[in-house]
Each structure stands twice: as C-alpha cells, then as structure tokens.
Image: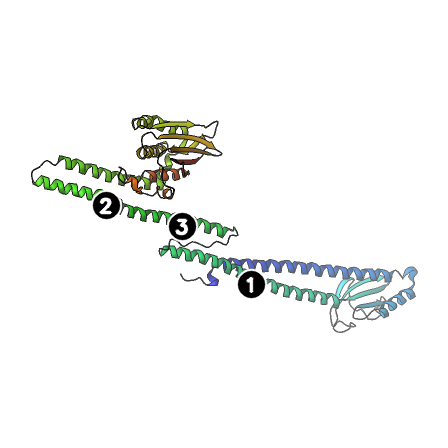
Amino acid sequence: MRRLSLLRSTPFRLALTFAVLFVIAFTLSGALVYQLLRANLSDRLDQSAKETFTVVAATYAGADLEDLVATVNSHAKLASPREQLFSLTDANGAHLAGNFLAKGIPAGFSVIEEGAPGVPSGNAYRAYSGRVGPFDLVIALGLSQTRDLERIVLIGFGWATLLVALFALGGGALLALRVQRRLDAIAATMGDVSRGKLAARIPLIGNGDDIDDVSAQINAALDRLSALVEGMRQVSTDIAHDLKTPLNRLQLILEDAGEKAAAGRNIVGELLDARTESGQINETFDALLRIAQIEAGARKARFKNLELDDVVETIAEIYTGVAEDSGMSLSLRKTLQGPGRRIHGDAELLTQMFANLVENALRHCPPGTSVELTVTQHGDSVVATVADDGPGIPQAEHGKVFRRLYRLDKSRSTPGSGLGLSLVHAIAELHGAKIVLKDMSPGLAVIISFPTSHGT
C-alpha cells in the first residue's frame, strides 16, 4: 500500500489547521494586550503630567509670579531635558521660565513630535498646557522610556509568536505523524486481510482512546470474519468427508438396482434404500441452509418477549413419553420466581433448540438414563440446562461438537448428520445467549444463559 505523504494526511491537515488557528488567536490576544498596555502607559503619563502641572500651578497663590517662576526653574534644573520640559510664558509669548520655549502648543494634552522648535532633537514628548493666571504653563514628559518599553514588549511578543508558531506546527506534526502511523497500521492490516491473511490484527496501544476503540471493533469484526471463513472451510472439508459415504452408498444402490433391472429382477428394495439415502442427504443440506439463515439473523424480525419456562415445559410434555418408551426418564425443574423471567426471542427456534438437545441425549444415552430440564434465574440471566447421567462427551471434544457435520467417532454408526448441536449453537448466538458444556461425571450438562427482557 502506498504511504500517504505528510501534507496529504488528514491528521496533519487537522494539526496544521489547529496550529494556524492557535497562532491567530495568540496574535489577536497579544495585540489586544499590547494596545491595553499602551493605553495604560499613556494614561499614566497624562496623569503624571497633569499632577506636576497642578503642583507647579499651586505656587501662584496670591498672584506671586516670583514663586511661580522659581518653582518652574527649580523643576527644570532638576529634570533632564530628555525626560521633562517646562515652559512658562506670558500672554505675549515671552519666555519667563523653564528649559524650553513652548510655541503653538494647544491647551490640554498634546504630543510634541521630534524636531519641534525649541525641543531637544531626537525626542518626543507628551505635553499638558494650561493657564496659570494670565500665564501659559506647559509640562512635557518624554516619550522615550514609554516607547522603549512598548518596543521591548512588541519585540518580545513577536518572538513569542514565532516560538508559539514553531511549537504549534512542530507539535502538530509530531501528533499527526503518530496518528498517521496508527492509521497506516490499520490500512496495512486491512490490506493483509484483503490478500488472504485473515490472522492479521491491528496493534493496540492500550490507552483507550477512540482509535484504539475503533481498532478493537475492527479486530472483533476480523475475528468474526476469520471464524466464519474457518467455519466455511471446515464445512467444505466435512461435506467432502461426511457426505462422500452416503453419496457412495447411493451410487452403489443405484448401480445394484440397474443390474437387477437389466436382469429383470425386482428393484423395489433398492429404490426404497435410494430414497432413504437421498432423503438423508437432503436433510443435511436443509439443515446447513437453516443454520446459515439463522446465523445471518434473518429470524430476528420474529422476536418477541416470551416466557422461557413455557417453551421448556412444552418440550418436557412432548418428550416425556418418548423417553419412557426408550427406557429413560425425563423430568422438569423450574425455580423462576417473580418478574424478570421473560426473554426476547423466537419461540419456534427455541423449541427446536431444546428439542435437539433432548433428542441428542435420548439418542446417545443407554436405557436407564435420567434426563433433566432445569430453568433457573441468576441475576439478569435466565439459565436453562439440559443434563443427563449418560456416557457424556470427552472433555477434549467439548470445543468441537458445535462444528457443522462434526460427529464423535462412537456416533458415526448411528443415524444423524452432525448438525444438531451446530443448530443449537446458532440459535443460542442469535438470541445473545451463552452456551457451555459441563462434564457431570457421569453425564453431560448443556447450560444456556439468556439475557432477560423486562419489556411487555
């Protein structure tokens, strides 16, 4: 399978999209913070200029010009021209005090840009101008420190944006590569399965994320597919082995009938034997088709809530006499109490399932065997058991008897197709029931646990 390039992979595109959105969000938030910081610094500078103006103007009490001039000059001498400028002029614009001559500066707040007349070169100021009696007083605070701080913040934010972008893109690429490797593993596994490697499975990390969940579900589907394919292979093998004998017998019977017919002899017996053999073969194929239909879930549309003990009780009524005729005994024991006894299922299929189990016990057990049907409740499950005290089934064969056409060696001489327990297993799985074989020493118990249905 051709490996997708990084730029074409969906995880990388998602990571790239997220990284771009993150950088944009970071940039917008940084720009907002920068504007708020700039506005705050400007407000603080204005407040400082106005407070200084108020302090200086307060010395003009009682129209004392000398105190005002002395205060302005004192502040001007103590301050660096780069940081603070003071100007006091009369109504005609004549310079009275300060370290610069203010010309054309409007009342209130304003900005004195670089190169203005009387202003030190290379500097800009935030000025506040107002009247103190008949005089004009201007307080100008340097913008160099504020602008230097804004420049440092802007440069720092630029570098931070670059680092965030690199980390976002790099981290997104790493995450995308990791996800892409897992998706490639899924694709590679499905490619192996398509080429016939049904044992291939998707490796799981075990962290319980959504990709692990999907992978586990795919693995479960592959397990089911592998089991079905193995079942079909086994069926083909079993058909080749188990149906070959009756087909050969049928061929021999027909050849014998042909020879007798050519000799003018009676062939009624051969024709009856041929009909019996062909009927057995037809029954086998009918059973295989029925199992396939059940496994496909075609009968689920007929499901409804029903009482399992009613089904088992019907089986007991039908087969009690049959067991007695064979020198055996069949009993029924029910311990269900209260609500929760109902299951969701098909009464006809369930009847056939329990009939197959009882017939299987009666067919393969000797006279004197006791067969017991039991229906009990364990938690949220209704448990039905068909148990006998006959010869049982060897423990090693428990996992094989549910295979289609599988028959124990000791049972090959008795009539049957080897599909009875396969049909039982298919019906149990259709109802979501768990079926278990238990060695009773002596005898065998088939235990089937059904989930209960609390609906009406």
Look at label 2 and name its amino acid.
Answer: Lys
Q: Tag 2 or tag 1, which sits nearer the N-term?
A: 1
Q: Tag 3 or tag 1, which sits nearer the N-term?
A: 1
Report how far apart the C-alphas of labels 3 and 2 lie in the structure. Answer: 32 Å
Report how far apart the C-alphas of labels 1 and 2 lie in the structure. Answer: 67 Å
- Label 3 Cα neighbours within 10 Å, binned few <14 / some 14-19 / many ≥20: some
Q: Position of residue 452 (x, y in %)?
A: 45, 33
Circle 2 — which element? helix
- Label 1 Cα neighbours within 10 Å, binned few <14 / some 14-19 / many ≥20: some
Give the label on residue 82, or none: none
Residue wearing tag 3: 222
Q: Foreground: 8 or 106?
A: 8
Give the label on residue 170, or none: 1
| Residue at the spot 26% in from the left edge and 44% down from the top edge | 242
Q: Position of residue 319 (x, y in %)?
A: 33, 28
Report how far apart the C-alphas of labels 1 and 3 lie in the structure. Answer: 36 Å
Q: Tag 2 or tag 3, which sits nearer the N-term?
A: 3
Disc 1 and disc 2 in contact, CB within 8 angstroms: no
Look at label 3 and name its amino acid.
Answer: Leu
Q: Foreground: 4 or 85?
A: 4
- Label 2 Cα neighbours within 10 Å, binned few <14 / some 14-19 / many ≥20: few
Residue wearing tag 2: 244
Q: Position of residue 348 (x, y in %)?
A: 34, 32
Q: Is residue 454 visible?
A: no
Quadrant location of the N terminus in the rendered image: bottom left
- Look at discs 1 and 2 and give the one toward the viewer: 2
Circle 1 — which element? helix
- Answer above or below: position of 307 versus 14: above
- Look at discs 3 and 2 and give the one toward the viewer: 2
Q: Foreground: 41 or 447?
A: 447
Q: Quadrant of residue 434?
A: top left
Look at label 1 and name its amino acid.
Answer: Gly
